[in-house]
Amino acid sequence: MSAYRALTPAEIERLEQLGNSSSDWAKVEVSANFSTECVRNSCFDGCVRIGEIAPSKVSMGLASVREGIYNSLIADCTIGDHPAIHHVKMLSGYTIGNHVVLFNVEEMACSADPKSIAWLEPMNENGGRRLLPFAGMTIGDAYFWARYRGYKVLMDRLEEFTYEKLRHSGGCGQIGDYCVVKNSKALRNVTVRSMKEDPSTIDGCVLLADGVVGYGCTVEHGVMAARFLLGEHVHLEFGLRLNDTVVGDNSTLARCEIGNSMIFPAHEQHHNNSFLIAALVMGQSNVAAGGTIGSNHNSRTADGEISAARGFWPGLCCSFKHSSRFASYCLLAKGDYPAELDIKLPFALVNNNVSKDCLEVMPAYWWRYNMYAMDRNSKKFAKRDKRVEKAQHIEFDNLAPDTAEEILQAVGLLKQWIAESKGRDAVYAKGMEKSKRPTLILHAEEGIRAYEEMLVYYAVKSLECDSLKNVLSKCGLTESAAQKDCAVREAEWVNIGGQIVAKRDMEQLIAEVEKGSVRNWDEIHERMDAFWKNYQAQRVAHAYGVLCHLAETKSLTETQWHAFQEEYRRICSYIEEQKVASRQKDDANPFRRMTCWDDREWDSVMA
């Protein structure tokens, strides 16, 4: 922004001739390159600073407007260079960046006191996980604060870090460079992050209060949001109602109602009749129409929570009870699930079979019956990631250390349930539903084989080596002393806003925050960046450990490694075959094709 100076008497006189007024012109400062001709019919109150203004036009999407300040009330604001502020009934307490357009806005007001900023209450309606958003807070930061509530010293430190951040950043009322806010009702205590390379837009009868909008976001068409944090490239539209919620990068929310939730990157929820409350949804997820995720008040204590690992896909008209938990990539068939659930099998299909009065779970469903979607999901999220800043690190691959460990645990459970079900026609699980009715495992033996294939595919693909010597070198092991040097497999991983981190690394970070060696949010970000830089090496070591586990050995022999490579090549061929086969199920369906007149139309529209 420009340096500022006092107005000259001639400038004050000309401003008044152009219909402007001020409670005290001495408190209005301008840049050296300030044109009085570009300020008309406006009122200034308190301390106001205005940057460079020239007689030119500024683009706001399909139209352009004159640069300057027109028909607006400005109070206690700092305005950057080349603004276009038109018909803003109240602009108070904001710092406005360069090349910003504010057009036809009823109210933009912000308090200068960080203590007045409203806390948001994600994941739980009783406020037990509350946090205070700030500009630059990542989804991982928010989860870190909301999740580790048992660490009292950590909680105190994070609150101190946040107030310090707010004091140094000028509070919450900031509008970034090249942002466009137009035809909107109100922005109260809202920061909008924006830059030339990744501008944000707010448009169309929007009402926002007490929140942060990340880089490259679009909020439009009647959205109402209070107490929120948006990551980068979030799209809110079409009458969405949002409160006390963190929304991860690259997510799209429309028409629905979401409250008291923590949503990780790449979440889709577009339907009028979908509802998400008091939930943790760990990204790469989709809530279909009729979804009621989190039925309230089903206990005599404070409301519970829904916790869903990444890849959560409830089908049409699904409803769940608090408290429930879902492993990664659970696909839930349409239904009203009558009791709390704890689905421990990843990549599973879950079905409430009303006719048989039982819960059915099919392990490894994605791998066995929908390979096209499974392969596409690993690619599409990365392909759709248009962020410039990318402050939040994200693991897009659906097979990674976190899901591999879930698979290993699932294999152990399936073997246990098979052993316990011997002598019976079916395999039944324990502990996946809070009810007396049975939980039936469909195709348990086939599920184990599919899970083991998934582990081999993940591990060999992660290692990307032609020889065992190179594998050991990648893992930091010596060939001659592999038995002695073999590293223990890292078995516990946590998803921190989309970034997969070894649990012990997070525990070390917590300890350093509590003892004071990590002193602010910037240093926490530096530590998370370091974890991300080391993640690929950790993933490689983990992949080797998975193969050792499958081979039931401390270290691999050449023979075992070549056997895994051969199995990997077979699995790759299987994947290609199944991708085509699973897609052909739809393409060959005559009921899908009957809406097209001929193959040419089908190929143009559906292919």
Image (cartoon, rainbow, N blue to C red):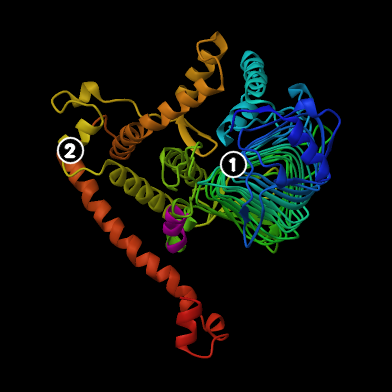
Which of 414/96 is in front? 96
Placement of 66 over or under 526, stated as above or below = below
Horizontal side, residue 425 vs residue 333: left or right: left
| Residue 315: x %, y % from top left | 63, 59
Which of 25/530 is in front? 25
Check residue 382 for magenta coloring: no
Which circle's residue, 1 or 2, is located before the other in the chain? 1
Segment tinted magenta in the rendering: 372-380
Which one is in front in this view, the residue at disc 1 or the one at disc 2? 1
Seen at 21% across and 36% down, the residue is 471
* Type of amino acid under label 1: Asp
Furthest toward the bottom, the residue is: 597
Query: Where residue 468 is drawn, which disc sits there?
Result: 2
Mark 1 and mark 2: Cα distance apart in space? 52 Å
Placement of 336 over or under 113, stated as above or below = below
Furthest toward the front, the residue is: 10
Seen at 77% across and 40% down, the residue is 14
Placement of the N terminus among the 4 image quadrants: top right
Which of 468/143 is in front? 143
| Residue 293: x %, y % from top left | 71, 49
Q: Where, by quadrant of the figure, is residue 531 drawn?
A: top left
Q: Which residue is mark 1?
A: 177
| Residue 324: x %, y % from top left | 67, 42
* Type of amino acid under label 2: Leu
Task: Tell me the element at label 2.
Answer: helix
Seen at 30% across and 25% down, the residue is 487
Q: Magenta span: helix, strand or loop, mainly?
A: helix
| Residue 151: x %, y % from top left | 62, 17
